[in-house]
Image (cartoon, coloured by chain):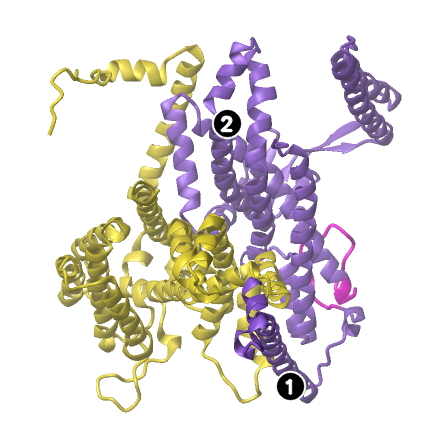
Chain colours: A yellow, B purple
Amino acid sequence: MKTAPELTAPPAPPGPIEWIRKNLFSNWFNSVLTLVALVFLYFVITATLRWVLFTADWRPVTVAPLLFLVGQYPREELWRPGLCLLISAFLIGMSWGVWERYVKAFAVFLAFLLAGLALFPLETPTITLTIRGVFLTAPALIYLGYRLGRLQAVTGRLVTLLWIVAGALISLVLLPGIPGIPGLNTVPTTAWGGLLITLLLAVGGIVLSFPIGVLLALGRRSSLPVVKVFSILFIEVIRGVPLVTILFMFSVILALFLPAESRIDRILRALMGTVVFSAAYMAENVRGGLQAIPPGQVEAAKALGLNNFQITTLIVLPQALRLVIPAIVGQFIALFKDTTLVVIVGINDLLGVGNAVLKLQPEFFRLQMEVYLFIAAIFWIFSYFMSHASLQLEKSLGVGER
Amino acid sequence: MTASTVSTQQGKIPLWRDERFLRAATQILSAAIILGLLYWAVSNFLYITQQRGMPLTYGFLKDPAGFPIAEYYIDYDPTMSFGRAFQVGLINTLVVSVVGIFFATWLGFFVGLARLSTNWLVSRIALAFIEFHRNIPLLVLLFLWYFGVFTKLPPVKESIALPGPIYLTQRGLYITWPRLSENGNIFIICLVIGTILALAAFNILRNIRVKTGRTTHYLPISLGLLFFIPAIGWILSGGSPFWLDEPVLQGFNYKGGLRLSPEFAALTVGLTTYTAAFIAEVVRAGIQAVQKGQVEAARALGLRPSQVLSLIVVPQALRVVIPPLISQYLNLTKNSSLALTIGYQELFAIGKVTINQAGRAVPVFLMVMGTYLAISLITSVIMNIYNRRVQFIER
């Protein structure tokens, strides 16, 4: 390795006084702005702090933390959502080990969040030591998964397979239960709620809408007029109407179009609405990626004698999908926030639990500000760190691939 | 293509490798699946509706609605028809969207520019505003504004008075509002004529200036038109085209002024601040997309800072800003459907009440979705035309 002794050190960063002069008081206008902003900040911060620490009554938030996490899920069956959390934590760790930079920021954030939750000083009898233990085990499992994922034998394909198996296990066996098996009593979906529902709808919505979205995007760019017209119609109609109307359609109108005796579960209907909505936006994101693939790629593949199916699945899609990962993360964040709309069709997600908590005791009646701010804070933390992780991802993708 | 011509020379190609056949087959198959599903759904629907006796007709729109609507901009009372109620809802949606878009644009541009300020503190405050709104669900924000702020305002007797005067109370906002006096419409007509003439003069004279290079004084002439014609109108209307309608406490409530219900206020404020955060990001991205070299080149050519901004930076930034701005406007309009959770009765909320009252879920629902779709399509068509005009003609 060559050394470069003649290299001089870069100029020292400006000192704090220099920095303040340059960024806050560069001219008289900036000085006035700074002073006004300081006064504004002083009043906002002191008023907020006074309210948060002294005026606000946080009892509705602290009285039933489990309600916010899992809703009415039977307390004697709590080990099941707990196990789901541990499985997911372990697999997130493995994904981190396998796809290193793609998942790293998110996995680290999750580990810290869970550890923080486990150690949060809250004196409620419902939060037992076991529950704290589960929250503390999860970060450890993330790390364990990470070490395992870095082994040569563990490939991306294996982890994907494990995710599919775990997803099916969680959503079809562990959470709803199977009649007839001891220890796995059925839990009706009406009892599910809180963050559990919010996450299920958001993750389920994005995962299930992915294949549909890819097909629609391909359909929109297809040279077959029938396929193209149907795809465009679907995408534009869904994107032209509000999510509320789609959710409402699936929760109320859908029943009129199915055979009279069929009954679809409430949460499944909401999920179907979310998936249909998300698929249209997914299609547009994927289309952006498809358009970015230079035509030379397809021509080269044709010259090599690949057929259309092979060109799409082996050449175009792998490149296009890699390009749209950041956009999909952005869409996931939007969908995560949009799942709050399911309260309108009567599902007890995080916001629904908030509404319910306000009716828990008569003296909570006027504490909406506290409850909704708490819910806003939960969403804020998740969304902020996910978009932060997505930014990191974008950077590493940009460095690695282009 | 070449593959098929080669193989026809060798003889008949098998059906499953004939591209024309495969294309036709795929299309017929997909059409058959989609149409088949539709047919199945519709036949189920017809069977169910026949059983329950609620046919897919729109005759019920003429029946009396029978439910009250708190806010309306065209005459309405419960004896009027469902169709009328639907119109009221549509207008409510449009009103809140237009008001929201107006304020969100101003606030968004303001925050976006503040974000780019060289003053570190101002830029950080703008960033905090943006990050707060972008990372929480709109519905939670609306609940915060409505249940947390506007319904927690003091009762009428202890209302908060802001300069204006504006009174904040539990029953809504009472705002001093200018109203047209008797002869006020003369002033309005003159104002409109003056604006049109000024715009026309500005465009025509500037075109002459640009084409021939003659000095046409386009700026003073158009400004003069803009000022003098309304001034004549002002004098003609007796010197006072407006009078201030001030809310006055009478008995248990305020009389006069412009009343905004807490629902409308919360919805407007929520939609405005939420969308403004997104617009601010759009504006920031647009201005940052203008290359530094453009500004430097303009300065080197001797343009004044105001000219650099108006002739170089803004036109190029607009090119980047307009398309995402349109989609933010559409988002705001679609998001106004969340109003039903806080009790502002717009299109979707009235559609829902109509479904309960008339029991005709599908026809009402088709109308609601169709209306939103029409709003979206019309807006994007208009905006696309505008967008094509500001787009660069790339060479």
Residue at (41, 60) in percent of width and height: A351
Using a 10 Å C-alpha cutoff, classify the residue at mark 2 as few (fewer than 14 neighbours), some (14 to 19) or many (20 or more).
some
Labels 2, 1: one chain:
yes
Amino acid on which disc 2 is placed: Val
Q: Which mark is residue B290?
A: 2
Gap between marks 2 and 1 measured at Cα = 59 Å
Identify the secondary structure beneath mark 2: loop
Query: Could you tell me which chain the residue with mark 2 belongs to?
Result: B
Position of the N terminus of chain A, as image quadrant, is top left
Amino acid on which disc 1 is placed: Ile
x and y, in percent, of residue A348 in the image: 41, 67
Q: Which mark is residue B48?
A: 1
Instruction: Tell me if residue B74 is in the magenta stretch.
Output: yes
Identify the secondary structure beneath mark 1: helix
Q: Is residue A267 above or below residue A30?
A: below
Query: Could you tell me which chain the residue with mark 1 belongs to?
Result: B
Q: Can you see residue A372?
A: no
Q: Is residue B192 left or right of residue B120?
A: right
x and y, in percent, of residue A193 in the image: 36, 68
Direction bottom: furthest residue: A180
Q: Can you see residue A283?
A: yes
Q: Is residue B231 above or below residue B387?
A: above
N-terminal label among 2 and 1: 1
Magenta residues span B65-83
Looking at the rendered image, the disc whose residue lies closer to the viewer, 2 or 1, is: 2
Direction right: furthest residue: B236
